[in-house]
Amino acid sequence: MALGDLLRHATLQKFARDSLLRMEAETAHKATLNALKFGLVPAGAADPANLATRFLGLDLSNPIGMAAGFDKNAEVPDPLMRMGLGCVEIGTVTPLPQRGNPAPRVFRLPQSMGVINRMGFNNDGHDAVARRLAGRAPGGVVGVNIGANRDSADFVADFVKGVVAFSPLADYLTVNVSSPNTPGLRNFQAEDALRRLLGAVTEARAGQGRQTPILLKIAPDLDEPQMDDIARIVLASGIDGLIVSNTTIARDAVAGQENATEAGGLSGRPLFALATRRLAQMRLRLGPDFPIIGVGGVHSARSAIAKFEAGANVVQLYSALVFGGLEMIEEIKSGLSQAIAAQGLGSVSGLTGTAVADWAEGRGAL
């Protein structure tokens, strides 16, 4: 691309990003989904060979994924991967369609590149999402994040329904017990409840023709004994991986900022330090080989590298794209590839866990 073309492309990207930031947050999100649906977002560059990653037995062209919440209803997983992501996690999906909480329910914190949401698992339900996934051409890695309906009488049964519905269609499943926006959901991180839930979902998977990998997504708002319990149960359960972490209900990192007192889960850059420390602490508890996705506050190449150094095998992002635009994905991949090469490593796996003790003790820094 000639210099003039590059400048015009950068100007258009900035115009699009600035235009979206002037919109109400949820309206801007819908506009971005529509742009992806209609092919208005350019395809990403070919990935450098040193970004190729194998995770859960799946081949990824790069280890940067879209976190759940962006594409709740499996409307744009393929455009997202064409744009340059190595994997996409859709959802959270509940058995029955659900409207979620009343709007407004998404709030930007521009001073710190943060977002607070209290969406409440708004989605089209199992049937509609399963039809979309069944209709896409094979290719790429698509995970499905499953949850429970807010008014369900049996949350465990809802998760089992998710395993049955999406085992034939997903490359992996994520059991989401960590959203703060469904009352009672985080109670399933407690020892007895988590053991019962993971037992039910692994038993349900055993009855399917395809043994789809199952991951558990946990909150960052956990203390040391809770992390001990979760690690012990996860290792005994037969599930395949962990995602650290969901949004936080803490507000220490954004005290006094615009919208900081809104109810809901905080994500984006203010979550980075807490989520990355929890990632490292769970890596120490689970050992060097257990698959972990690191998510929470990734906003630059350096922050993605730090997630790997803290113990991640794959990282996901979402909220930072609100402020940095979708082009941030290429910037992160480029910086990650350069860091791998500069350290004389063959792949991103050489970075995983290299600074885990520092991050676990809160000494990690960007």
Image (cartoon, rainbow, N blue to C red):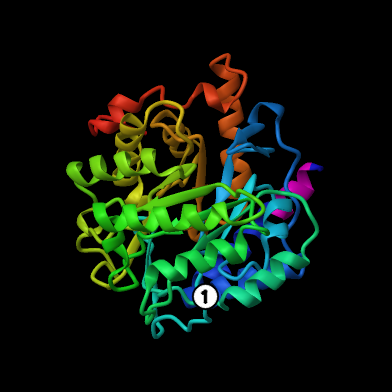
Find residue 268 and report its horizontal and vertical position in percent.
40, 55
Q: Which residue is mark 1?
A: 95
| Residue at (69% x, 38% y) in the render | 61
Residue 190 showing in the rendered view: no
Residue 82 showing in the rendered view: yes
Where's the N terminus, which quadrant?
top right
Tag 1: Cα neighbours inside 10 Å, few (<14), some, or many (≥20)? many
**Helix, strand or loop: magenta stretch:** helix
| Residue at (29% x, 58% y) in the render | 193
Residue sitting nearer the eye, 180 or 325: 180
Task: Tell me the SS state at disc 1.
Answer: loop
Residues shaded magenta: 3-9
| Residue at (46% x, 65% y) in the render | 159
Residue 40 position (above or below residue 238)? below
Residue 42 falls left or right of residue 70:
right
Find residue 68 and report its horizontal and vertical position in percent.
51, 59
Where's the C terminus, which quadrant?
top left
Q: Is residue 7 magenta?
A: yes
Residue furthest top as drawn? 344
Residue 156 falls left or right of residue 208:
left
Residue sitting nearer the eye, 106 or 256: 106
Quarter of the rendering containing residue 40: bottom right
Residue 351 position (above or below residue 313)? above
Residue sitting nearer the eye, 267 or 211: 211
Residue 44 falls left or right of residue 110:
right
Residue 165 position (above or below residue 253)? below
| Residue at (67% x, 53% y) in the render | 209
Q: Is residue 240 magenta?
A: no
Find residue 59 and report its horizontal and vertical position in percent.
68, 37
Find residue 23 and report its horizontal and vertical position in percent.
51, 76
Residue sitting nearer the eye, 261 or 157: 157
Q: Amino acid at mark 1?
A: Pro
